[in-house]
Image: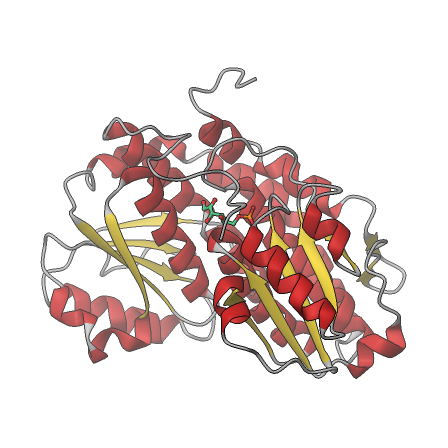
């Protein structure tokens, strides 16, 4: 039931404060400044032996895994990365006993992810799941994991599940961090940040009218560039995927640092840029990128914690802890994708050629 919403995508975007509240509920342990993850099935002794984390997923789940990898590196100081499950399974990967593998899937049924899990298990690896659908194939095949608790997601294009998956990774990263070398003070700081998320999401969603108006300015774009650095880069990648899926406007994401190595050649008024500009230690670097784009007459939409002078428009989002900022910065861009698609009259809940769960190779 869509209730008052015109599409499931809109309904699901709007539900995110409650969804995040659900993934946090009952898991925070203030006494030890950590979180309890009941289904993880990973004892502390084993958790301390992990030397690397490899995250596998497809599409939006792969992007959530990229933010997850960043969180695990930052909070638990374990080298981590995310790779498309299909690439992983076809390159005869070296399976290492000290690596923790994590399969990410909203549906829990994506065939490439399931096949990667089965191959890993056959080779004796430990595989956890970060899954939304309880009791799904991937949830059953993995040794344990974290449920995302986003609730049912009907729109083919994933929004609330992406956000909740990233929060689930923040919980996992905090848990691993507090078993390893993350201090009590940092644990407290991250917990306080997590608790702020639902309210901050509500604040962002309250700016929908502004974003809807903004979307009107981009319906004529044939292509758009999305840029970010480090924490902001996977946010840019996911925002770019969202825009192309629902609006059919071509979009490409690039690390802002790579602009001068190629994509600057594309900059002109007909090629707008969306820039993720968090107020963290890379702020000045990001500002320099905006300057380079402006100097070439590029249009810029910034998502930032304060107005960006070089941008034509800034969507200002509330600041959280640096590590948790990526969770919030993608949300206005879900609304941008939605309103651009709406203005172009697209079939928002069922984009052409796509299916909600891809159970074939
Ligand atoms: C994007 C989207 C797809 C899915 C991908 C994986 O909006 O919905 O890219 O994220 O097909 O699906 P799950 O997460 O069910 O494994």
Query: Which residue is nearer to you in this view: 208 or 158?
Result: 158
Q: How many marks?
A: 0
Where in the figure is residue 218, as x and y percent of width and height?
A: 20, 42
Where is the N terminus found, in terms of image quarters? top right
User: Seen in the image, is 282 located left or right of residue 215?
Assistant: right
Where in the figure is residue 317, as x and y percent of width and height?
A: 45, 49
Residue in the picture at 58% in, 57% down: 113
Residue in the picture at 67% in, 72% down: 75
Where in the figure is residue 303, as x and y percent of width and height?
A: 37, 53
Query: Which residue is nearer to you in this view: 149 or 361?
Result: 361
> Is residue 288 among what the camera can see?
yes
Q: Answer above or below: position of 331 versus 326.
A: above
Q: What colour scheme governs how the chains and residues are painted in the rendered image of this protein?
A: secondary structure
Q: Answer above or below: position of 58 versus 5.
A: below
User: Seen in the image, is 254 located left or right of residue 82?
Assistant: left
Residue in the picture at 75% in, 80% down: 50
User: Seen in the image, is 19 located left or right of residue 269?
Assistant: right
Q: Answer above or below: position of 56 versus 180.
A: above
Residue in the picture at 26% in, 42% down: 248
User: Seen in the image, is 226 located left or right of residue 4?
Assistant: left
> Is residue 189 among what the camera can see?
no
Query: Which residue is nearer to you in this view: 110 or 39?
Result: 110
Where in the figure is residue 355, as x and y percent of width and height?
A: 45, 38
């Amino acid at each position: 039931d869509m209730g008052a919403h015109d599409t499931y995508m809109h309904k699901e975007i709007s539900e995110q404060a409650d969804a995040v509240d659900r993934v946090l509920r009952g898991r925070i342990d203030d006494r030890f400044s950590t979180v309890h993850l009941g289904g993880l099935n990973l004892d502390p002794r084993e958790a301390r032996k992990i030397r690397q984390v490899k995250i596998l997923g497809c599409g939006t789940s792969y992007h959530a895994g990229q933010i997850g990898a960043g969180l695990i590196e930052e909070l638990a100081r374990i080298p981590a990365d995310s790779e498309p499950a299909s690439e992983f399974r076809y390159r005869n990967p070296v399976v290492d006993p000290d690596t923790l593998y994590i399969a990410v899937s909203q549906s829990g049924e994506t065939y490439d992810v399931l096949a990667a899990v089965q191959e890993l298990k056959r080779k004796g690896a430990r595989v956890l799941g970060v899954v939304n659908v309880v009791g799904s194939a991937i949830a059953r095949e993995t040794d344990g994991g974290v449920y995302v608790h986003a609730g049912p997601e009907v729109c083919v294009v994933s929004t609330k599940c992406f956000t909740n998956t990233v929060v689930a990774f923040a919980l996992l990263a905090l848990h691993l961090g507090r078993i390893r070398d993350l201090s009590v003070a940092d644990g407290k700081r991250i917990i306080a940040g997590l608790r702020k998320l639902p309210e901050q999401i509500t604040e962002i969603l309250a700016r929908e009218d502004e974003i809807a108006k903004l979307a009107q300015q981009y319906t004529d774009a044939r292509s758009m560039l999305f840029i970010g650095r480090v924490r902001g880069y996977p946010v840019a990648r996911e925002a770019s995927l969202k825009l192309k899926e629902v609006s059919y406007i071509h979009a490409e994401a690039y690390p802002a640092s790579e602009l001068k190595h190629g994509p600057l050649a594309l900059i002109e008024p007909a090629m707008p840029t969306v820039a993720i500009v968090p107020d963290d230690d890379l702020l000045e670097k990001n500002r320099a990128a905006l300057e380079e784009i402006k100097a070439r007459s590029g249009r810029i939409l910034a998502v930032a914690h304060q107005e960006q002078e070089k941008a034509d428009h800034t969507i200002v989002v509330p600041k959280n802890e640096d590590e948790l900022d990526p969770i919030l910065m993608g949300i206005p861009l879900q609304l941008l994708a939605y309103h651009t698609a709406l203005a172009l009259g697209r079939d928002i809940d069922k984009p052409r050629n796509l299916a909600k769960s891809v159970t074939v190779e």
